[in-house]
Amino acid sequence: LKQVQETLLVIAKVGGGAVERERETFMCVRYVLAIKLALRIRQLDPDARNPNTPSGRRAVMESAALSTILAGLPLVPKHQSMMARIAADKNLAAGNFGAAAAHIRRLMDALPASQHGGLLEQLQQCQMNGETDVRAVSPSQRICYRSLVLVASPYIKCNFCPALFHPQQGGLSSRQSCPFCLHGSVFAMND
């Protein structure tokens, strides 16, 4: 995480062409969010191992939601496949068989047929459960880049990069500098 954030500082200082700077900044900002999501999911894993308790069930459901958002981030293909794998496993554990099936199919499309063995069994499990979800989250659901909570409208958005923030839990107000890309300013938005 620190290396990606340092890269953002270098991009901000060195500059370069506007198109290159924007592309590199967007990719770095997405990876900062991806790393934060992966770390939060790993932090939830101990509680998620005991899904029969209220805190364990909450951890299972939060892991499923965060992993779905993580799998929906436009990362390099190798990392997208890794995130789809995590999302499939977390959604299976949560009973989100429709979401898990979607991640499994995406993963199967990205992998050679020789690596489909365990995925086929998981897909059959999803199909046997009618590909129904207990409580799935859309991969395009907005999430606060700082607090990692789901965001509806209104929200605060950077005018340069894809970062957005929850108005109360994001710790930012309009016209502040974006803490992620270091290029833009954040503004209140409504749908």
Image: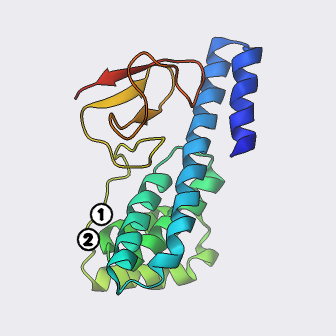
In-image side of 47 versus 78 (left or right):
left
Q: Which mark is residue 21?
A: none
Q: Are marks 1 and 2 in contact (CB under 8 Å)?
A: yes
| Quarter that holds the C terminus | top left
Q: Amino acid at mark 2?
A: Asp
Q: Which mark is residue 133?
A: 2
Q: Nearer the viewer, residue 4 or 136?
A: 4
Q: Amino acid at mark 1?
A: Ala
From the top left corner, tell me how far across and down residue 109 is, in percent: 51, 62
At horizontal 31% and vertical 32% (from top left) the residue drawn is 155
From the top left corner, tell me how far across and down residue 110 is, in percent: 56, 60
- Quarter of the view holding residue 113: bottom right
Gap in Å between the C-alphas at discs 1 and 2?
6 Å
Residue 93 against residue 83 in the figure, above or below: below
In-image side of 41 versus 96 (left or right):
right
- Sort mark 2 into few (<14), some (14-19) or many (20+) by Cα contacts within 10 Å: some
In-image side of 98 versus 68 (left or right):
left
Disc 1 target residue: 136
Query: Quick one: SS at disc 1?
Result: loop
- Quarter of the view holding residue 95: bottom left
At horizontal 62% and vertical 68% (from top left) the residue drawn is 112
Q: Nearer the viewer, residue 40 or 106?
A: 40
Residue 1 against residue 71 in the figure, above or below: above
At horizontal 56% and vertical 77% (from top left) the residue drawn is 116
